[in-house]
């Protein structure tokens, strides 16, 4: 056997010439050898607004298997991924570009390890950004008889990518407000769902909805007289 090492990728023509010591004849055989250099390469469309999908173009070459990992980096350099995928395209996709879902705003590292048919590996890591916020709020009082005047407090905090810019409240009864901490008067008895939408300084909008947050229902009196006709001085049963 003969072992040959090529230092550069490409297609090489290998020729073997066999001669005989007893005759002037020769035998020539040729074969093409393709030398590939496995390379991991991805191109993401960053930033995006979360929750949302990020397009990932896989430009890797000479790969046989693919291992994807997504690391959340807002709090430092983690060692445990928040998501992992296998296959040529992440997120279970079957086309290029594939869509990788991000449900939570933050900064992330997308890592791809590509392995070729000979177990050679190459790794690439690309930082990406998913802008957005996670709106939070409280209200008091949340229960009472109408008219019920309820004041809302915005508890939204900046993320590692975005800051709150403006607010839009939906109080569930047709009323709304653009104040950060509004009050609203519920005039009609009912149970109401409240939503807060926050626009951040990256142009992303994020909404949090709390179903049935406000109960402005008044108690309903019910009275049934058992004895509807009695004599003076007698007691009636209800």
Image (cartoon, rainbow, N blue to C red):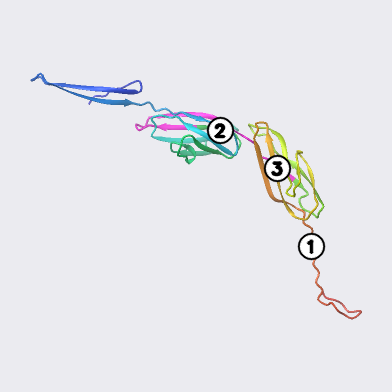
Q: Is residue 16 left or right of residue 155?
A: left
> Residue 129 occupies which quadrant of the picture?
top right
The C terminus sits in image quarter: bottom right
Give SS at disc 2.
strand
Whether residue 125 is situated above or below residue 156 in the rendered picture: above
Give the distance between the C-alpha atoms of the residues marked 3 and 2, in whole angstroms. 26 Å
Give SS at disc 3.
strand
Viewer-nearest of discs 3 and 2: 3
Residues in magenta, as a range: 111-138
Q: Residue furthest front?
A: 174
Q: Residue furthest left?
A: 22
- 130 within the magenta span: yes
Mark earlier in primary sequence (1, 2): 2
The residue that disc 3 covers is 196
Q: Judge the density around disc 1: few (<14), some (14-19), many (≥20) Cα neighbours within 10 Å.
A: few
Camera-side residue: 82 or 147? 147
Mark earlier in primary sequence (3, 1): 3
Residue 220 is marked as 1
The residue that disc 2 covers is 108
């Amino acid at each position: 056997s003969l072992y040959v090492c090529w230092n550069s990728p490409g297609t090489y023509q290998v020729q073997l010439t066999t001669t005989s010591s007893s005759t002037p004849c020769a035998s020539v055989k040729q074969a093409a050898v393709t030398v590939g250099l496995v390379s991991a390469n991805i191109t993401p469309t960053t930033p995006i607004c979360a929750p949302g999908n990020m397009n990932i173009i896989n430009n890797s070459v000479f790969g046989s298997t693919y291992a994807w990992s997504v690391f959340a980096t807002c709090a430092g350099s983690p060692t445990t991924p928040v998501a992992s995928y296998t296959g040529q395209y992440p997120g279970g996709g079957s086309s290029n570009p594939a869509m990788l879902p991000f449900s939570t705003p933050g900064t992330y590292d997308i890592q791809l390890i590509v392995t070729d048919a000979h177990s050679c590996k190459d790794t690439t890591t690309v930082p990406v950004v998913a802008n957005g916020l996670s709106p939070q709020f409280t209200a008091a009082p949340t229960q009472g008889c109408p008219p019920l005047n309820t004041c809302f407090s915005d508890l939204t905090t900046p993320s590692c990518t975005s800051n709150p810019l403006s607010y839009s409240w939906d109080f569930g009864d047709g009323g709304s407000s653009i104040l950060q901490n509004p009050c609203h008067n519920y005039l009609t008895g009912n149970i109401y769902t409240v939503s807060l939408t926050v626009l951040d300084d990256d142009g992303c909008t994020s909404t949090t909805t709390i179903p049935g947050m406000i109960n402005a229902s008044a108690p309903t009196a019910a009275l049934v007289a058992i004895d509807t006709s009695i004599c003076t001085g007698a007691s009636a049963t209800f």
